[in-house]
C-alpha cells in the first residue's frame, strides 16, 4: 500500500486534498479537526515524530495567481471581465511536518487558516515538540493556538506589535525599537 | 552586569513570591554563548524552574530569504550554524536541488561529504572544548582549537573562507579538492585523533569530570522523541537514529560507519557520542577520499543549472543530519526566482525548548553543563 | 607648584602620561561580547592559533566592570540593544569599543526588521572591522590599531583641560 | 642595630617578598598556562612579557573606580583589603630561612616565631573568607552573593580537614611553632628518607594539599569565582584596583599556603641529606637556606598553576561531599592512627 | 518534576580515588609545557609551532581567500570593468554602487570595454565577502583579493571607492598575491534545459574565455553560467 493510500485510509473524511511534489506528500485537513486528524496520523498512520510547525502567508501567492490569470485571460479575450470568484481562499496556512520513525516517511500536513479567525487547535498535547514552533508561528503570523500552555512572543520582544513574517509587513520593519527602563525598577 | 541581570529579570515578569530566588542568567553570560537567556527560580543552588528566552539573535533570515534570490540566500545559510557552516550550505543546496529535481554528480557528492564531515568534526570539537571550558577545564579547548585551525585551513584553501564558507553552489561544487587536503589529510587525521585522545585523557576518566557529567540531565528516550530531539541529543538517549543511515542523502548509504548511541541521555553520553562521532567522521572521510581519488580527473563536479534559478511551483522539505541533528529546509516556491517561503528547521531549537524540563531539579552548575552539551547555536536557534 | 607642568607641557606630566598609556595599551582586557559568527573568530583570535593574550588582552571576564575593551562581535538585534547599552554604561572609564564584522558595524546583510543597523548609533565605536567575519588576523590588526590609539591619548592633559574648561565655565 | 630595626627590616623584606611572589605569579600563571595550552602568553610588555603585571597594575590604578549605587558602600570598600591583608599577615610566621649572621648578630629568618604560629595561620586563613563574603554580599548582586555563599561554605568545610591534617603534624612534632617543626624535620627517617613531614604523614599531606587548594580557591575548587557559572563570582561588581587587590590577594594567599606546605611537610629551608651550615659561612648559609626554601615554595606555586590548567571544576554539592564525606573521615582516621603510633613509640 | 532514567555510577578504583587520573592529566599538560618551553627558545617569530605571532609571523593565506575587493586591470593596464552592475545585482547585502560611463575618444588605453564604471563604491562594512559579485562579474573585473587588514577608525574610510579598489589590485599584484588561474571544473550536461539551450551558453562562454585574462578567471569556475548572462541585456 502506498503512502498516499495509507494516509487516505488513516484520515478518512478529514482529508481535503492530497498532493505530491518531488516525493513530498502534502495533505490538507480542516482546521477544526486538527487534533483528531493528528492523533489518528500518529497512532494509526505511524507518524510519531513532529519535525516542525510553521505558518505560511499566501496573500502574495494568490495575488500573483490572480494577476496571472487575469493576464492570461486578457491575452485570450480582452473584453471578458474576470469572473467573480467565490469567497477568497484562506490567507494563511499552518504546515506540520511529520515523520514516521519506523518507515522514515515524511508528510506535510496543511491547515488553511482564514485571516478573520486565526485560532488553530494546538497540538502541544500530542507532541510537546510543538511548543516553541507554535509560539513562533504566533509571533510571526499571529495564529492563536488554542490550548497552548504559554502562548507568548518567542523571538520578538513582548512589546512588539506586528507579525513580521506576514507578507504585508515590510522587510526593514516599521522602525520599532526596544526600550527597557532600568531605572524604575 | 549583575545589576543588569537583576533588572532584566524583573522586566519580564516579577519574581514569584515565595522562598525562591529568581536568578537571571544571560543574555551576556560566559556560559550563554552570547545570546541565550535563562530565567531560573532557584532554591539555594537547586533549580526549581527554568525558562529559556530566545530571540536575542533573531535576524529575520527567513523574511530576508523571501526577498533574495535562491543564489543570494546561500551565503545567509552560513550564518545559521556558524560552527559548521558547510552543513548548512549543503542542506540548502540539497533542498533547492530537490525542488529543481536534479542530482549532483557523484564526485561533487563525495566532495560535499568530505567537507561536511570535516565541518562535523570542527563542530564537535568546539562543543567538546566549550563543554570543557564551562566545566572548568580550559586546556582541552585549546588542544581542540588547534586542530580546528587545521580544518579551517582546508576550508580556506578549498573555497576561500574560514568560517562562513558558502561552499559550493546550487548544482555542485566549484572547486576540486585542494592540494592542501591531499598533502595534509594523512597527518591531520592523526593529529585530530591525537587531540581527541588528549582530551579523552584529560577528561573522560577524571572523576571530577565523571561526577560532573554522569547522570546529569539524564533524559528518557520517549520524552526526547516527544520533544522532537534529533541528532546526538537523541542518540545519547539511546535511540539509534541518524539521517545519514535512515534517510540517506548524497552517497552516505555507500559508506561503512557506526552510529554511536548512549544510554541515559546525560551529559556524559552526549559528550561521548560526540567524541565517537568524530572518529566515525574520520572513517567516512577516509572512505570518501579513497572513492574520490578513484574518480577520473574530468569527472563532472557541477550539474548544469540555469543562472537564474526558478524551481517549479510546489513545496518541499529536505533534511540532513547536521552535527546537531536534523537540519531541514522547507522551501515553498511560487515559480519565481525568489523562494516564496523558506523555513529552516534548526536542530537545537527543538532541543532547547525542552531546556526547562532538562534542568529542572538540577543545580546551577548542571544548567551550564547541560546548555553546553546541547550545543545551542544562537544563529540557527533564532535565525 | 610649577605652573608650566600643569599646563601640559611639563616633563613630569608627559612622562606620567606615557607611563599610563604604556600600562593601558599593554593590558587591554577584552569583554568578548560575541553574539554570532564573529564570536567564533574572536574565540579563534583568543585561542592558541593567534593568541591575543600576547598583547596582554587576557583574563577574559564577562563582567563589564573589569574590562577595558568591549569587543562587540556579532549581530546586535533590536532586542539586544538595551542590553548592549547597559553593558557599555557599566564599564569603567577608560573604555574602548571594537565593532567586529559587518553586522556589528552596519547590520551587514541583515537589513531586516529585527536587526540594529550598526552599533555606532548606540555606543561610540573606536574601531570598525569589515569582514563577515574578519579573519583573526583582522581582529588582531584592529587591536594593534587600538593600542596605537591608546598610546596617542593624553589621559591626564585631557582631564586637566576638562577641569580648566569647567572652571572657566564657572567663572 | 636594635632589635626593632631588625624586625622592621624583616617585615619590609617579607612584604616585598610576598608582593614580588604575587606579581611574578600573575606572570607565571599566564605564561605557564599559555605554554600548557600550546600558545605563547603575554610577551609584549618588557622582555618575555615580564612587565605585564606592572602594566596591569598601572591600568587598574588609573581606571575609574565604580561603586554600584545599591551596594553597601563601606563594606564594599572594606572587602578587598580584608581579603588581601590576612594573606600578607600570615607570612609573619613563615620561617623562610634558618638564620643569618650579620654584624655579629644572629638573626632568625622569620618575622616572629610565635609559639602558636600554626594556629595563627589557621585563624588568618579563616579571616580571609570575610573579605570574600563581605565583598560578595555588599555588591548587591546575585552572582556575587552566590559566590560569597559558596566561599563561606567551602572554606568552613575545608578548614576542618586542614585542621585535622595539621593536628597530626602537631602530634608528631609536639609543637605549635613552625620554626621548631622545621628544625625537627632535619636528618633522616628510617635511615634513607629525609625526615620530612610528607614521609611521616603522606595521607596528612594529601589532605592538607587538597584543603589548601580549597582555601586558595583554585581550580578544581574555584567555586566562589566560578567563571562559567557565576561570571566572576564574589568580585563580579569590583573593578579597578579593588579588583586588583582581590586578584593580588589570591596570589599572596597562594604564596602563604605554599610556604606553609613547605615548612610543614618538606623540611622548610633544609636540603635533604646535606647540612648546609657545615660548609657554608654564616651569611652564605642564611642566603642558601632562604634560596632552598624559595625553590621549594616555587615548586608548590607552580603546582598550583599546573593543576589549575589540568582539571575541571567540582560542583558545589560534590565539593561538600568530598570535604565532609571523604576528607574529614580520612583526617580523623589519620589523626587517630597517628595518635596511637605516637603514643606507642614514645 | 521530569522523569529521569536512573543512572548507576560505576567507577573503577582508579577513577574513584581522583588522584590517579589527575596525575595522568598533569603528565599530559607537563609534556605540552616542556615541549612549548623548548620551542619558545627557538629563533624567529614562529616559535611555538601552533601559534602564529601575527604582526611579525603571518600565516599563509590561501590564494583564493575572499578578502578585500579589487578592480582588475588586464595586461595592458586597462580597466576591465564595464560598469554593467551585475555585481550590484548579485550582492545579497546590496553594498555595491556602480555607475556606468561611456568611454570617450582617447581613453582606449585606459578602459578595455566600450563602457566603464565612472563610480564604483563598495561599502565594506556591509559586505559579507560571499563572492557572489565575483562570480557574477562577466568580465572577471571584480575579484575578492587577499587583503584582510581592513580595520579603520571611522566608517567613512571603510567605503572603498574606485581608486582604493584599483590600489588594492596594484598592491596585490606587487606582492604577487593575485589568484592563480584556476581551471574551471567540468560541468555535467544539463538533464533537460529549462530556460535556455545550454549549447548557446557554452559557445558564448568559450568565445568570452579567450578574451578574459587568465589570472582574472574566477575561482568559481562557474564562468559558463556567468558568461551566459552577458547575453542578457546588461543591467540598467
Image (cartoon, coloured by chain):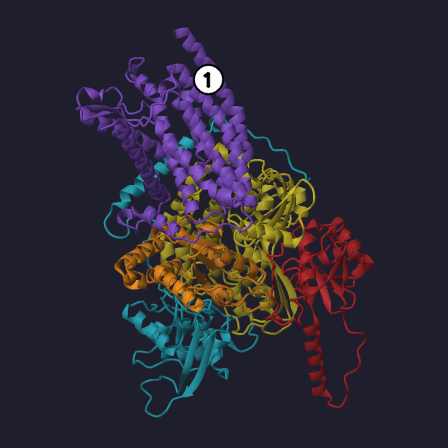
Chain colours: A red, B yellow, C orange, D purple, E cyan
Q: Is residue A22 above or below residue E17?
A: below
Q: Is residue D157 above or below residue E100?
A: above
Which residue occupies the foreground of this view, C60 or B293?
A: C60
The reply to whether residue B122 is visible in this rendering is: no
Pointer 1 chain: D
Q: Position of residue E128 (x, y in %)?
A: 47, 67
Q: Is residue A36 left or right of residue B94?
A: right
Quarter of the image holding residue D249? top left
Q: Is residue A41 left or right of residue B190?
A: right
Q: Is residue B251 left or right of residue C69?
A: right
Which residue occupies the foreground of this view, D149 or B302?
A: D149
Q: Which residue is mark 1?
A: D334
Q: Secondary structure at mark 1?
A: helix
Q: Position of residue B249 (x, y in %)?
A: 56, 56
Q: Position of residue A71 (x, y in %)?
A: 69, 84
Q: Position of residue B319 (x, y in %)?
A: 59, 57
Residue projecting furthest to the right: A13
Which residue occupies the foreground of this view, A156 or E148?
A: A156
Amino acid at each position: 500500500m502506498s503512502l498516499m493510500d495509507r494516509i487516505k485510509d488513516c484520515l478518512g473524511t478529514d482529508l481535503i486534498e492530497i498532493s505530491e511534489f518531488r516525493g513530498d506528500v502534502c495533505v490538507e485537513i480542516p482546521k477544526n479537526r486538527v487534533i483528531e486528524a493528528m492523533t489518528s496520523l500518529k497512532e494509526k498512520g505511524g507518524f510519531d515524530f513532529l519535525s516542525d510547525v510553521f505558518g505560511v502567508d499566501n496573500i502574495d501567492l494568490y495575488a500573483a495567481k490572480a494577476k496571472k490569470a487575469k493576464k492570461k485571460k486578457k491575452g485570450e479575450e480582452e473584453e471578458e471581465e474576470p469572473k467573480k470568484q467565490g469567497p477568497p481562499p484562506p490567507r494563511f496556512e499552518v504546515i506540520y511536518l511529520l515523520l514516521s520513525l519506523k518507515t522514515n516517511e515524511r508528510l506535510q500536513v496543511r491547515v488553511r487558516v482564514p485571516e478573520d479567525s486565526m485560532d488553530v487547535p494546538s497540538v502541544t498535547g500530542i507532541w510537546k515538540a510543538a511548543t516553541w514552533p507554535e509560539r513562533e508561528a504566533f509571533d510571526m503570523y499571529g495564529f492563536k493556538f488554542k490550548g497552548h500552555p504559554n502562548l507568548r512572543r518567542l523571538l520578538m520582544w513582548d512589546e512588539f506589535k506586528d507579525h513580521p513574517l506576514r507578507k504585508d509587513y515590510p522587510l526593514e520593519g516599521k522602525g520599532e525599537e526596544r526600550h527597557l527602563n532600568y531605572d524604575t525598577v | 552586569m549583575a545589576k543588569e541581570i537583576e533588572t532584566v529579570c524583573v522586566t519580564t515578569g516579577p519574581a514569584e513570591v515565595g522562598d525562591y530566588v529568581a536568578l537571571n542568567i544571560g543574555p551576556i553570560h560566559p556560559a550563554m554563548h552570547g545570546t541565550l537567556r535563562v530565567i531560573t527560580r532557584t532554591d539555594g543552588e537547586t533549580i526549581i524552574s527554568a525558562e529559556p528566552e530566545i530571540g536575542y539573535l533573531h535576524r529575520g533570515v527567513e523574511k530576508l530569504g523571501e526577498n533574495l534570490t535562491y543564489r543570494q540566500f546561500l551565503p545567509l545559510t552560513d550564518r545559521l550554524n556558524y560552527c559548521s557552516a558547510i552543513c548548512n550550505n549543503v542542506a540548502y543546496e540539497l533542498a533547492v536541488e530537490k525542488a529543481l529535481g536534479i542530482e549532483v554528480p557523484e564526485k561533487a557528492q563525495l566532495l560535499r561529504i568530505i567537507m561536511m564531515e570535516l565541518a562535523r568534526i570542527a563542530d564537535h570539537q568546539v562543543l567538546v572544548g566549550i563543554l570543557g571550558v564551562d566545566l572548568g577545564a580550559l586546556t582541552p579547548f585549546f588542544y581542540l582549537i588547534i586542530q580546528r585551525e587545521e580544518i579551517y585551513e582546508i576550508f580556506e584553501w578549498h573555497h576561500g573562507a574560514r568560517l562562513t564558507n558558502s561552499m559550493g553552489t546550487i548544482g555542485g561544487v566549484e572547486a576540486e579538492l585542494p592540494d592542501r587536503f591531499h598533502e595534509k589529510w594523512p597527518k591531520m587525521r592523526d593529529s585530530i585523533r591525537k587531540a581527541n585522545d588528549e582530551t579523552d585523557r584529560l577528561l573522560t576518566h577524571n572523576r571530577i569530570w565523571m561526577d560532573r557529567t554522569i547522570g546529569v540531565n539524564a533524559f528518557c528516550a520517549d520524552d526526547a522523541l516527544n520533544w522532537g530531539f534529533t541528532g546526538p541529543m537523541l542518540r545519547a538517549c539511546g535511540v539509534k537514529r541518524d539521517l545519514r543511515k535512515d534517510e540517506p542523502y548524497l552517497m552516505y548509504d555507500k559508506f561503512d560507519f557506526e552510529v554511536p548511541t548512549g544510554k541515559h541521555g546525560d551529559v556524559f553520553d552526549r559528550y561521548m557520542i560526540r567524541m565517537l562521532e568524530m572518529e566515525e567522521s574520520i572513517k567516512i572521510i577516509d572512505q570518501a577520499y579513497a572513492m574520490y581519488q578513484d574518480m577520473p580527473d574530468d569527472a563532472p563536479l557541477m550539474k548544469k543549472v540555469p543562472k537564474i534559478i526558478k524551481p517549479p511551483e510546489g513545496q518541499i522539505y529536505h533534511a540532513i543530519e547536521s552535527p546537531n541533528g536534523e537540519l531541514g529546509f522547507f522551501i515553498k516556491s511560487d515559480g519565481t526566482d525568489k523562494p516564496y517561503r523558506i523555513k529552516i528547521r534548526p536542530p537545537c531549537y527543538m532541543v532547547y525548548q525542552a531546556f526547562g524540563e532538562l534542568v529542572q531539579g538540577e543545580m546551577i552548575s548542571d544548567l551550564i553543563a547541560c546548555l553546553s552539551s546541547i550545543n545551542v547555536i544562537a544563529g540557527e536557534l533564532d535565525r | 607648584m610649577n605652573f608650566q607642568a600643569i599646563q601640559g607641557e611639563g616633563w613630569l606630566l608627559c612622562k606620567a602620561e606615557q607611563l599610563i598609556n604604556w600600562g593601558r595599551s599593554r593590558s587591554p582586557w577584552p569583554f568578548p561580547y560575541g553574539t554570532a559568527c564573529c564570536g567564533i573568530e574572536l574565540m579563534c583570535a583568543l585561542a592558541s592559533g593567534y593568541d591575543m593574550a600576547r598583547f596582554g588582552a587576557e583574563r577574559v571576564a564577562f563582567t563589564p566592570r573589569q574590562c577595558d575593551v568591549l569587543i562587540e562581535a556579532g549581530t546586535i538585534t533590536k532586542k539586544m540593544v538595551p542590553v548592549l547599552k547597559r553593558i557599555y554604561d557599566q564599564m569603567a572609564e577608560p573604555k574602548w569599543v571594537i565593532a567586529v564584522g559587518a553586522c556589528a558595524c552596519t547590520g551587514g546583510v541583515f537589513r531586516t526588521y529585527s536587526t540594529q543597523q550598526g552599533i555606532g548609533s548606540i555606543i561610540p565605536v573606536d574601531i570598525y572591522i569589515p569582514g563577515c567575519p574578519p579573519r583573526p588576523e583582522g581582529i588582531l590588526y584592529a587591536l594593534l590599531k587600538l593600542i596605537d590609539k591608546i598610546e596617542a591619548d593624553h589621559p591626564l592633559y585631557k582631564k586637566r583641560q576638562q577641569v580648566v574648561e569647567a572652571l572657566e565655565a564657572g567663572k | 642595630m636594635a632589635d626593632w630595626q631588625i624586625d622592621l627590616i624583616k617585615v619590609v623584606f617579607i612584604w616585598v617578598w610576598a608582593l614580588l611572589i604575587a606579581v611574578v605569579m600573575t606572570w607565571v600563571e599566564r605564561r605557564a598556562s599559555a605554554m600548557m595550552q600550546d600558545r605563547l602568553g603575554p610577551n609584549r610588555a618588557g622582555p618575555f612579557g615580564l612587565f605585564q603585571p606592572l602594566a596591569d597594575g598601572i591600568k587598574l590604578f588609573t581606571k575609574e573606580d565604580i561603586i554600584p549605587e545599591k551596594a553597601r558602600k563601606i563594606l564594599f570598600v572594606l572587602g578587598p583589603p580584608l581579603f588581601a591583608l590576612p594573606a600578607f599577615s600570615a607570612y609573619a610566621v613563615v620561617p623562610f630561612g634558618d638564620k643569618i649572621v650579620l654584624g655579629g648578630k644572629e638573626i632568625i629568618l622569620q618575622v616572629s616565631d610565635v609559639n602558636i604560629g600554626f594556629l595563627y595561620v589557621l585563624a588568618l586563613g579563616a579571616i580571609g573568607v570575610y573579605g570574600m563574603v563581605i565583598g560578595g554580599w555588599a555588591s548587591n548582586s546575585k552572582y556575587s552573593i552566590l559566590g560569597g555563599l559558596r566561599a563561606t561554605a567551602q572554606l568552613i568545610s575545608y578548614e576542618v580537614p586542614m585542621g585535622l591534617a595539621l593536628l597530626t603534624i602537631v602530634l608528631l612534632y609536639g609543637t605549635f611553632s613552625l620554626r621548631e617543626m622545621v628544625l625537627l624535620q632535619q636528618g633522616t627517617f628510617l635511615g634513607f628518607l629525609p625526615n620530612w613531614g610528607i614521609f611521616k604523614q603522606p595521607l596528612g599531606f594529601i589532605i592538607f594539599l587538597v584543603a589548601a587548594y580549597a582555601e586558595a580557591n583554585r581550580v578544581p575548587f574555584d567555586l566562589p569565582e566560578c567563571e562559567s557559572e557565576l561570571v566572576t563570582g564574589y568580585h563580579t561588581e569590583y573593578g579597578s584596583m579593588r579588583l586588583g587587590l582581590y586578584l593580588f590577594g589570591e596570589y599572596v594567599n597562594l604564596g602563604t599556603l605554599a610556604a606553609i606546605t613547605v615548612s610543614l611537610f618538606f623540611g622548610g629551608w633544609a636540603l635533604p641529606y646535606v647540612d648546609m651550615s657545615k660548609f657554608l659561612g654564616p651569611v652564605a648559609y642564611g642566603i642558601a637556606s632562604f634560596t632552598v626554601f624559595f625553590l621549594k615554595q616555587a615548586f608548590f606555586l607552580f603546582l598550583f598553576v599546573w593543576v589549575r590548567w589540568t582539571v575541571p571544576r567540582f560542583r558545589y554539592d560534590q565539593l561538600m561531599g568530598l570535604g565532609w564525606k571523604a576528607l574529614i573521615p580520612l583526617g580523623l582516621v589519620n589523626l587517630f592512627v597517628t595518635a596511637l603510633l605516637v603514643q606507642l613509640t614514645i | 518534576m521530569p522523569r529521569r532514567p536512573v543512572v548507576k555510577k560505576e567507577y573503577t578504583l582508579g577513577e574513584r580515588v581522583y588522584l590517579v587520573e589527575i596525575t595522568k592529566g598533569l603528565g599530559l599538560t607537563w609534556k605540552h609545557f616542556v615541549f612549548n618551553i623548548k620551542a619558545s627558545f627557538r629563533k624567529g617569530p614562529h616559535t611555538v609551532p601552533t601559534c602564529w605571532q601575527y604582526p611579525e609571523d603571518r600565516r599563509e593565506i590561501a590564494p583564493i581567500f575572499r578578502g578585500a575587493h579589487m578592480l582588475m586591470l588586464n595586461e595592458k593596464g586597462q580597466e576591465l570593468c564595464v560598469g554593467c552592475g551585475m555585481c550590484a545585482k548579485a550582492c545579497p547585502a546590496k553594498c555595491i554602487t556602480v555607475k556606468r560611463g561611456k568611454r570617450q575618444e582617447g581613453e582606449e588605453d585606459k578602459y578595455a570595454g566600450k563602457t566603464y564604471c565612472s563610480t564604483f563604491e563598495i561599502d565594506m562594512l556591509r559586505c559579507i565577502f560571499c563572492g557572489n559579485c565575483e562570480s557574477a562579474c562577466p568580465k572577471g573585473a571584480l575579484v575578492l583579493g587577499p587583503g584582510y587588514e581592513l580595520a579603520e577608525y571611522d566608517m567613512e574610510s571603510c567605503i572603498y571607492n574606485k581608486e582604493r579598489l584599483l590600489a588594492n589590485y596594484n598592491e596585490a599584484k606587487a606582492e604577487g598575491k593575485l589568484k592563480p588561474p584556476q581551471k574551471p571544473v567540468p560541468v555535467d550536461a544539463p538533464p533537460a534545459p529549462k530556460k535556455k539551450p545550454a549549447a548557446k551558453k557554452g559557445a558564448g562562454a568559450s568565445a568570452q574565455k579567450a578574451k578574459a585574462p587568465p589570472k582574472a578567471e574566477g575561482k568559481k569556475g562557474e564562468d559558463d553560467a556567468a558568461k551566459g548572462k552577458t547575453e542578457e541585456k546588461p543591467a540598467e
